[in-house]
Image (cartoon, rainbow, N blue to C red):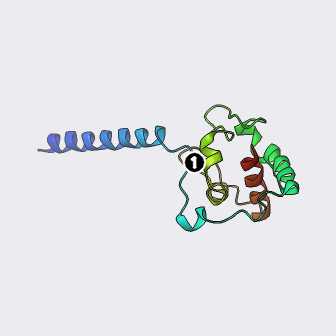
Amino acid sequence: MTRIAGTAGLAVLTMLIIQLAFSRTNARPVQHAPAAASQKPNPYEGQQQARQAGAKLYQRECAACHGADAHGLGKALPLASPEVRQASPGTLFWVLRNGSIYRGMPSFSHLPDEQRWQIVTYLKSL
């Protein structure tokens, strides 16, 4: 009986590992933010000065993984992609704040809100 239980347990564990691997490889390019966060408007939308500040911050904080041209490096998401362009500003802000564990992106909560919104303003201009 112990051998059967061990085999069944191993089968369940294998299924869970396969399911986790599948969910990671098919994860959405841009994580879904909670509804309240995704609906937040960008207070700097359309402001050239904010876009320029965001471009500088992007080079300092993001380019090492996403590339100087935002086309992605390695497994990092290309930020000039349609998925990112179509994401709401609030969603991008939320991802910057919280990171994305499934994509290996760290949180940028060390940046003040203003700087994260500036990066969002830059990303939406790509």
Tell which residue pokes out farthest to the left in this image.
1
Residue drawn at point x = 47 percent, y = 37 percent: 25
- Identify the residue at horizontal 55%, vertical 51% (top origin): 31
Q: Residues within 10 Å of mark 1 (few under 14, many from 20)?
A: some
The amino acid type found where label 1 is placed reads Val
115 w.r.t. 36: above or below = above
Q: Nearer the viewer, residue 86 or 37?
A: 86
Asked if residue 37 lies left or right of residue 14, the reply is right
* Residue of label 1: 30
From this view, report whether residue 117 is shown above or below residue 6.
Answer: below
- Figure check: 39 above or below 16: below
Question: Percent x, y for residue 89?
Answer: 67, 57
Report the residue that reaches farthest toward the front. 46
> Residue 54 or 81: which is nearer the viewer?
81
Task: Give the vertical position of 73 relative to 23 (above or below).
Answer: above
Q: Quadrant of the N terminus?
A: top left
Could you say which is closer to the camera, residue 84 or residue 96? 84
The residue shown at (82%, 52%) is 51
Q: Using the image as rendered, state which of residue 14 and residue 91 is in the foreground.
A: 91
